Amino acid sequence: MSKKIIGILEQREGKLKKTAFEVCTVLLKLASQLNAETEVIIIGNDIENINELNETGIKSIIHFKNTGLKNYSSSAYTKIIADYAKEVSAEYLIFSGTSLGKDLAPRVAARLTAGCAMDCIEFNVDSGEVVLTRPVYAGKALIDLKLKSQIKVITLRPNVFKAERKSNDAKVNVMVKDVNNLDLKTKVIEFKKSEGKLDVSEADIIVSGGRGLKGPENFYLVENLAEALGGAVGASRAAVDAGWRPHSEQVGQTGKTVSPSLYIACGISGAIQHLAGMSSSKYIVAINKDKDAPIFSVADYGIAGDVMEILPVLTEEIKKIKS
Amino acid sequence: MKIAVCVSHVPDTATKVKIAGDGRTIDPSGVTYVINPYDEFAVEEALKIKEKNNAEVIVYSVGTDNNKETIRKALAMGADRGVLLKDNNERDSYGVAKALAEEIKNEGCELVFMGKQSVDYDNSIVGQITAEILGYSCVTVVVDLKLDNEKIIAEREIEGGKEVVETILPAVITAQKGLNEPRYASLKGIMASKKKIIEEKPAASVEPLTEVLAMKKPAAKQPGRILGTDSSAVSELVKLLREEAKVI
C-alpha cells in the first residue's frame, strides 16, 4: 500500500483561505517525490469556493460537515483529524502555520504521538526521508530537522510556498461526511475583526514605522503609503512599547515574523530583533535619517533622509502610477 | 486552586546567534540568558488570579541548574515555589511537554500558564502538547482571560482580529504580549524569593520525536543602494520597485 499524505485546508466563514492552496501545492510536490497518495480534509459547514480546488490538481477531498463546525473548535477539529489519520494510516499531515494551524497541528500531533515540524520554509526528500528547514531565533538561524515518528505533522509558514494553479480540466471528487457527536468543549464563539485593516502576517506589502516618526500623530504618513500600495501597516517594537501602535502590528522577535514581497521600513533603525523578523522579505526599502543605521545593511534600496519629508512624496508618486 | 506556570530559560532577544562546534545548536559563550519574554505574561496572569482567588502558584522549568535563575525570577515576582525538572541534555518540545505534564498531573494543578512560544526554537507547541497529554482544554496566544468558576472566556490574537474562545477548566493557557503588564520584582520580592524552595527532580525520560540535523545561518543579504538623502530620490525608487524588483 502506498503512503498517504493528507493536507488540512483551512476555511474561515465558509471560504477556503489563500494558505489552503499553498498546502495543496506542497502536498502534490511532496507526494510526487515520495510516490505517495494525496487527500485533503476540509472541516466546516458550506464552503462557497470549494470549486477553486479544481485548479490545484488535488483529486480527492473529504469534507467533514456540520453546522457546529463552521467556527473553529480545537477539541472537535483535533478529534476529526486524528481519528481520520488513524483510520487511513496517514503518514504525513500538512497544515498551514496560520493561527488556526499553529493551535491545531500540535494538538493533533500529540494525540497521535507524532513529531511536529512547525513553520517550515523548505523541504527536501533524501532517500525517502523528508528533511525540513525552519527558522529559529526569529530567523537569526535555520535548522534542518527530521521527524522520527511513524505519523509526521508539518506546518508550512504562510506566504512562503507559492500556490500553483493549473487549468481546471479534472473535476475534484468531494466526499461529504456528516459528523455528529462533536466534542465542542473548546470552541470559538465570536470573531472580533479589527476595523478593515489587513494583518501584517497576511500582507504581501508591509509599510512599517518606528521611532523616526516622532509620535503616533505622524503614523498617518505610514498608513497613507500602505493604503496607496494596498499593503498592511507594521510597527517597530519601540513604537509599540511607546504605546503608539497596537501589539498586533509589531514586526520582529516578540512580534510577528514576516516575509512579504515588499517591506518598507520608515524611521526604523533596525534593532537586531526587528531585522530577525523581516529580513527574509523579498525586497526591502529603508527610509531613515541616519545613513549608518543597521536597517540599511538589509535594504535593497534606501533613502538616507527624513521620513516626514519623503513619505508624502512617495505616497503621491505611488498613487499616480496606480491610477 | 493550584496554578502551574511553566517558564523557559532562553537567550536574550538581543543575542547575535553563533553556531556551536556541533553544528546543531547555538554557541552559548557570551550569551545572556533570561526568562522567556512571553513567560513573564504567564507569571503575571497567574499572580493576578492568585491575588483574587487565594491560589498557590508553582513554577516549573525543564533544563539544567541554570534554569534556577529564571525560576527565581518568577518567585521574585510573587510565585510561591519552584520545581526544576532536571535534564542536562537537549530535548525536543514533546519531551519538555511530557516532563511538565507528568509533574502537573501529580501536583493536581487545574490551571496551567506558559508563554505562547519560547524565543529560542519558536515552535509554539509545548502548551498544546502538554494540554493534550493531560487531557486539558487549551487556548493559545491569549490576550484577554476571564475566569468564572469552571468557565473560561479567552480572547486569542489571530490574523486580522481576535477570536473569543469558550472552554472549561482544567486548562492550559498560552500567553501573548498584551495579556497584561508584567510587574517588576520588588526588592522585597527578590529578598523573599531567596528563601522560597526550588525542588529538583529528574525530568521524565522520553524518546524524542524530532531530530535536529543541522543549524545554519540564513544567507546574508547584500546591502543595497542608497539612492539619495531626500525626496528627490523618490522617482528613482519607484522606478526600481516597478522595473527591477517588479513588486508594485
Image (cartoon, grey):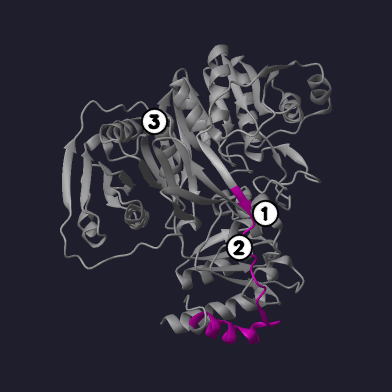
Q: Residue at x 62, y 19 (%)?
A: B50
Q: Earlier in the sequence, mark 1 or mark 2?
A: 1
The numbered disc on residue A112 is 3
The numbered disc on residue A273 is 1
For the residue marked with disc 2, what is the amino acid? Ser
Q: Residue at x 55, y 65 (%)?
A: A281
Q: At numbered mark 1, what does the secondary structure look like: helix, strand or loop?
A: helix
- B91 in the magenta segment: no
Quick check: A46 left or right of A190? left
- B223 in the magenta segment: yes
Quick check: A233 left or right of A42? right
Residues rendered magenta in the picture: B214-242
Distance, label 1 to label 3, CA atoms, is: 35 Å
Mark 2 or mark 3, whichever is nearer to me: 3
Residue A159: x and y in percent read: 44, 59
Q: Earlier in the sequence, mark 2 or mark 3?
A: 3
Q: Earlier in the sequence, mark 1 or mark 3?
A: 3
